[in-house]
Image (cartoon, rainbow, N blue to C red):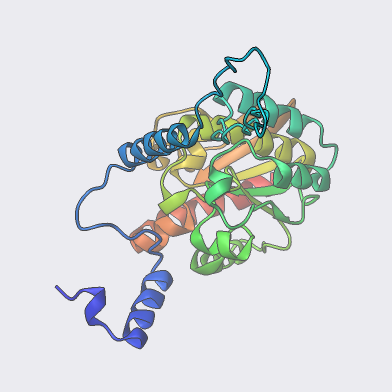
Amino acid sequence: MIEASHLAPAELAALLHFYADSGVEWLLEDAPVDRIAAFAEQQAARAAQMRDRTPPPAAAPSDNGRRGPGQTEARAPAPRSPAPTAAVAIPDAEAVAAARLAAEGASSLEELKTALEAFSGCNLKNGARSTVFGTGNPSSGIMVIGPMPSADDDRDGTPFAGRQGQLLDRMLAAIGLSRESVYLSNVVPWRPPGNRPPSPAEIEICRPFIERQIALARPQHLLLLGNFTVRFFFDSDGTIFSLRGEWRDLVLGGLSVKALASLHPQDLLTAPANKALAWQDLLSFKQGLAG
């Protein structure tokens, strides 16, 4: 196995650029490292070091306060400032309540975007480069929703970027639409590290923002793309293959809207044979718009 120390600086730089372009975000050690235990050891060592540095309390004078010639009064050590404490994570229930309050306080999409960018109660935001908010025409009556930002979305700060976005553009064009004539968004506005699925707590924290975004855009038709998205809105454990292609009536924030689920562009890039199913769904969606 070639180690990094065997490479010239130019070769190592080229290798790192290759990894970055391929979407690699994490480098692994040769052996597993228990980071939690290592952190606990660091905290214990730091606490012991702080105890060693603390001077002993000054002894009480034995002469009842009287000092002889040349003696000076002993001074008490200056009070030490408390050691900094680690930031306390916001409990999930409080984060959900804070998200709901921030979302409900927005009276326009612009205000909702500002509130989302200022919100710090979701861990996903800490590892994401961008807060990906909806783009396109919110007054079109048509909203296309994906699951969460991809690496391209996170880099560009817009939903459905990169190859997935290019394929979606062709899919929409096939039924007479474009990304400028619809409103595009994602359920989750921040890309999870390594494209992992969001946790149930993270999903609930993000829920008020996407539901408020739908309420403010007021679409009449939703096109839901991907397994995660359809399970989120249909509240089902089924797969996209069992839930796709069928119109459903959803009530979100007091708004009744018709929704149809289909495969995500990434599903088609991974398995081109699924394009026939997606084409059937697009035709159903076009027919539903005309009805």
Q: Position of residue 83 (x, y in %)?
A: 56, 34
Q: State the image quarter where residue 160 is shown.
A: bottom right
Count how many numbered circles sit on residues in the image.
0
In this view, the residue in front, 278 or 288, is: 278
Q: Position of residue 170 (x, y in %)?
A: 56, 68
In this view, the residue in front, 208 or 257, is: 208
Q: Position of residue 255 (x, y in %)?
A: 74, 30
Q: State the image quarter where residue 5 is shown.
A: bottom left
The residue located at (41%, 77%) in the rendering is 17
In this view, the residue in front, 272 or 6, is: 6
Horizontal side of residue 16 vs 112, given as left or right: left
In this view, the residue in front, 210 or 180, is: 210
The residue located at (50%, 57%) in the rendering is 150
In this rendering, is residue 10 above or below 149? below
Horizontal side of residue 183 vs 107, given as left or right: left
In this rendering, is residue 119 above or below 269? above
Q: Residue furthest left?
A: 1
